[in-house]
Image (tube, grey):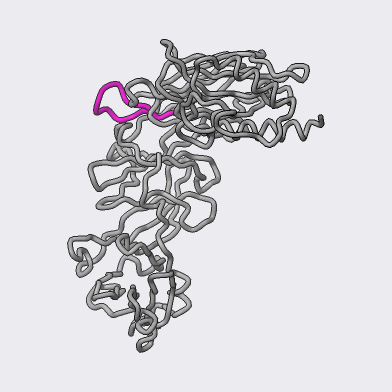
Amino acid sequence: MGRKKRIFWLLLAASLLLGGCSMRTVEQMYKLPKRSEAYNNLQTAIDSAMGSLEYCAPLAGENRQTVHMADLDGDGDQEFLLFAKSNSERPLRILIFDLIDDTYVHMDTIESNGSAFDQVEYVQMDRNGGVELVVGSQLSNQVLRSVSVYTFSNGEAELLVSANYTKFLTVDLDMDSLHELFVLRPGQTDGDNGIAELYGMENGTVERTNEVNMSAPADKLKRVVVGKLHDGETAVYVASAVGDTTLITDVYAYTSGRLANVSLSNESGTSVSTMRNYYIYADDIDNDGVVELPSLIPMLPGGEEINGIRREMIRWYAMRADGTEVDKLYTYHNLVGGWYLELDQQWIYRTTVIQQGNGYEFILWTEDYSSAELAATVYVLTGQNREEQSRLGDRFVVYKTDSVIYAANLGTAAAEYGITQEYLIRAFRLIQQEWKTGET
């Protein structure tokens, strides 16, 4: 049988072994139209090795299947890894099968403590060929979790390092084309701020870099994303909650041979990227490949609070590895309505937004703040007659969805500030849901 056909059946077999912990066999779950010899060999090896074990797929991450395929030893052929659970003192099991002389053989088993597999990654952490296996497990209390790194460079599983974590990810922070293990974990005592650590491989062993403090306890973690700094370096952006309505974002990068929190403010002892009154997360808002962070600009009197909701202008900036900031974009965000408008830096600090019914008036103050004029109004139109409302007077449509029409008209100060119909259409955006939703 040709290799491509054999791999097809093996992939099909692997895709059928999905789901959480279960005693069911592949035969009980599905019936294949035709089974190859390679599939039969693999099924026989699995049945023999499983015994009374239960299938137990990882709960998070991209690899949530019960059976995975990866070239662990770097020989060019992929091994099969089956995730299972027993009733023993070390219940979590990873069964590894390899193809030898056209027959799949159960080569190794990794046993560990825990109640479930949390997250599994396959990454290259050294240049010896093959990939390292990074396994996160939930412990019995389901609060504390443990991550372990295994290498197979010598033909069998070798544990390199284990560490407790609240969140881990694999990332190439030092940009050497090899991955490191980035770990966020609790501090020494309850209430202490969390700790960030970086583990990398050197000469076959794993080395840990210096510890770096988080700006909040690890259990306040809300969102972790990987992105680029302004100068192109890779960074990890970690958003944590402070109280019920505030976000603090730490930005971790590898600089001068060390892991550093490049956003840490020496004056306050916390991250400079603090959002007050509501959550907005760091994101690549202008789609240039660099992650921007939000900073509030207090609105002038007259638009500070409407119906108990404080509205703010937002300055978006990128970070350099040396901690300096680069201004990128300025916006008015209407979080309740789910939309925002890009604004010119020259008059962002002189803008007040006041809601009048379904309209939002953008009022611009003179440089000496002695007087103000209406520059434009944005209307949020719903209901059955929204089409007619969008054409009233000199209104024009800036954006349309299935249920909402966003229209606008120009005010008396529009020409003075270069605000045109084309400008408003180009500057109007809907807020992406992930900006408001934390994902750890």
* Start-end of magenta stretch: 183-195
Q: Residue at x 35, y 30 (%)?
A: 213
Is 385 magenta? The answer is no
- Percent from the top left, x then y, of residue 283? 44, 51
Which image quadrant for residue 172? top right
Where, quadrant-wise, is the C terminus in this rendering? top left
Does residue 364 appear in this view?
Answer: no
Is 192 magenta? The answer is yes
306 vs 40: above or below: below
Left or right of 230, for residue 372: left
Residue 210 or residue 362, whichever sits in front: 362
Does residue 27 appear in this view?
Answer: yes
- Percent from the top left, x then y, of residue 255? 50, 34
- Percent from the top left, x then y, of residue 305? 20, 63
Left or right of 125, for residue 33: right
Q: Residue at x 54, y 14 (%)?
A: 51
Which image quadrant for residue 204? top right
